[in-house]
Amino acid sequence: MHLRKKNVAPKVGGIFAGVGLVGSLIGAYLGHITPGTDLLTYFAIAMIALGIYMAIRRESSRAGTVDEVNHVIDAFQRCKNLTLSTILKVLSSALLLG
């Protein structure tokens, strides 16, 4: 149905799937030949680098400002099914599972 309505770009999807497949195969191979402690170290380094990047990028300076609050309020108003009871159900189930 989405293909008929031209909501999907098959060429882009094919490229994305192909690159994702090759990347996952390379990652699986590298994960297999790399010792677990080294993988954990590399992952920690990547998370620290990502945290530093997120802290210094431009958009982080607007966090907690009126612009962000207005964006969240607008998102809540657009989503009719997101009620307080729905939020509480999701949070309680996350606490039980986690």
Image (cartoon, rainbow, N blue to C red):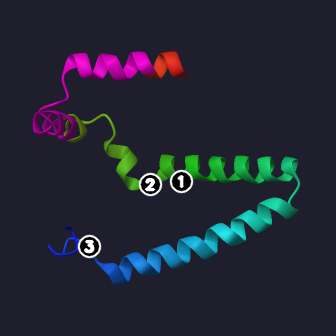
The three-letter amino acid code for the residue at tag 1 is: Tyr
Cβ–Cβ under 8 Å for marks 2 and 3? no
Which image quadrant: the N terminus?
bottom left
Magenta segment, prevailing SS (helix, strand or loop):
helix
Give the residue type that dot 3 points to: Val
Residue at image location 20% in from the left, 36% down from the top: 66
Q: Which residue is mark 1?
A: 53
The answer to if 63 sits in the magenta stretch is: no
Residue 65 locus on image (x, y percent): 26, 36
- Sequence-wise, which precedes: disc 3 or disc 1? 3
User: Percent x, y for residue 89?
Assistant: 33, 18
> Which region is colored magenta?
70-93
Q: Position of residue 59 (x, y in %)?
A: 36, 51
In this rendered view, identify the residue nearer to me: 22 or 39: 22
Q: Which mark is residue 57?
A: 2
Q: Is residue 14 above or below residue 34?
A: below
Question: Viewer-nearest of labels 3 and 1?
Answer: 3
- How packed mark 3 is, by other alpha carbons closer than 10 Å (few <14, some 14-19, many 20 or more), is few
Verify whether residue 75 appears in magenta.
Answer: yes
Q: Are marks 2 and 1 in contact (CB under 8 Å)?
A: yes
Residue marked by disc 3: 8
